[in-house]
Amino acid sequence: MSEKKVLIIEDEEDILALIHYNLTKEGFNVICASSGEEGLKMVAEEKPELILLDLMLPGMNGVDICRSLQKEPEFCEIPIIMVTAKGEESDIVAGLELGADDYITKPFSPKILVARAKAALRHPRKGAPAISDDSVIKAQELVIHPGKKEVLVGNQPINLTFTEFHVLHFLARRPGWVFTRYQIVNAVRGEDYSVTDRAVDVQIVGLRKKLGPYGKYIETVRGVGYRFKD
């Protein structure tokens, strides 16, 4: 049973109680805050290993909290899952680009929330890569060889462009994690490479086509970006 400490920052009492109950039932050590200011104070005092963060908070909102934590070396590597009402796409994107790791929309399944929390804690903190750059990645018959810059489907090599390969490798290194188009561009080409959102979408379309049935592993997260199926 897990004893990981999880901080919930949520101002809606019913949702706070629901999350608290389900995480506690799974063995997590759960602490709670009902405002952004209180949440930041508890981060400093309690040093949680995971934060579940509502975006729409009174006073300091979730995006402001992400921005504040990102500036602090002591706290910037704590995984954050944003909990948000549907339709706040710009805030979701902003939160992900400021360092949040995942998000869940309201209303949500408690089972999915618990699974996402466990997944976030299984991944390394943001300061370290999910796997070695040279590690081979396998998803059934889809195999990615970073060192060889080679992708195989059923032992058959797939001819990918430089960008297609690196987009696929970037997503596959952290399965289940949602990445914005901006994050994908920065990871593949560097911050100085100028490219539009549409260009990223074109790369994804090309990848899916070349991967055939395994193209389904690249999932679109509407209004936000993409992720590799966990």
Image (cartoon, helix red, strand yellow):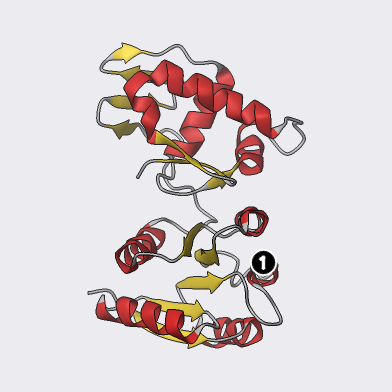
Amino acid type indicated by mark 1: Val
Q: Quadrant where the C terminus lies?
A: top left
Camera sees residue 171: yes
* Viewer-closest of 72 and 183: 183
Which residue appears at 51% of the width and 19% of the height? 206
Q: Position of residue 191 (x, y in %)?
A: 73, 39
Q: Position of residue 142 (x, y in %)?
A: 31, 26
Q: Is residue 203 left or right of residue 125?
A: right
User: What residue is at 59 percent from the left and 71 percent from the top?
Assistant: 75
Q: Position of residue 193 (x, y in %)?
A: 74, 31
Query: Secondary structure beneath disc 1?
Result: helix
218 left or right, relative to 58? left
Please tell me in which quadrant of the rendered image residue 155 appears. Answer: top left
Q: Residues within 10 Å of mark 1 (few under 14, many from 20)?
A: many
Q: Does 53 appear above or below 162? A: below
In the image: residue 172, left or right of residue 194: left
Residue 224 placement (x, y as % from top left)? 58, 47
For mark 1, what is the residue?
Answer: 63
Q: Looking at the image, which is closer to me, 28 or 226?
A: 226
